[in-house]
Image (spheres, helix red, strand yellow):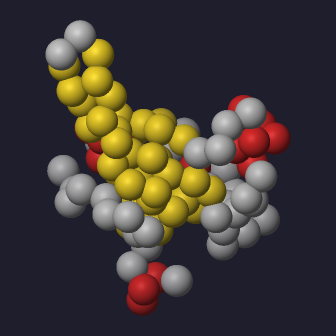
Amino acid sequence: MSDKPQQNDIYYHFKHITENPSKNPYYRVYRIIGISVLATNDQYSPHVAYTSVWGNSYEKETYGADFFIRPLDEFLENVSRDGYSGPRFVKIKPENK
């Protein structure tokens, strides 16, 4: 499992690879807002809050939201689908920009 995302880290979603026919460098690229905690019934689970960098109004126009929230474990997990097998989100390091 990868390191926990930090505020302002930049990641791309695996669909950046599988659904990006125009090779847009910002497609499915996200900036981490921070780690939040969902508190229900005295159980606390960490979640990642993130927003797109490929269209500031994407969340609003598509879902009526300002940003996305995903459970931390799900954010860090590996996926296998659409011919891709690897991490759901991949951190973009400065040398990868």
One can see residue 16 in this view? no
Q: Which residue is rendered at x = 47% and y = 38% of the image?
A: 69
- Name the side, left or right, on which 67 lies relative to 40: right
Residue toward you, 91 or 4: 4
Residue drawn where x is 38% and y is 64% of the image: 7
Reply above or below: 44 against 69.
above
Q: Is residue 56 left or right of residue 35?
A: right
Q: In terms of image quadrants, where is residue 93? A: bottom left
Q: Is residue 58 left or right of residue 66?
A: right
Could one spot residue 5 in this view of the protein? yes
| Viewer-closest of 15 and 63 | 63
Q: Is residue 67 above or below residue 10?
A: above
Return the residue nearer the eye: 72 or 79.
Answer: 72
The quarter of the displayed image where residue 54 is located: bottom right
Provide residue 91's location: percent of width, then percent of height.
Answer: 39, 66
Q: x, y (%) of residue 67? A: 59, 45
Give how far across and how far down residue 59 sits, in percent.
Answer: 70, 44
The residue sitting at the right extreme is 61
Residue lying at 67% horizontally and 37% vertically, measured from the top left? 65
Q: Position of residue 97 (x, y in %)?
A: 52, 83
- Furthest residue toward bottom: 95
Q: Residue at x 29, y 16 (%)?
A: 40
How many dots with numbers?
0
Would you identify the image quadrant in which residue 28 lies?
bottom right
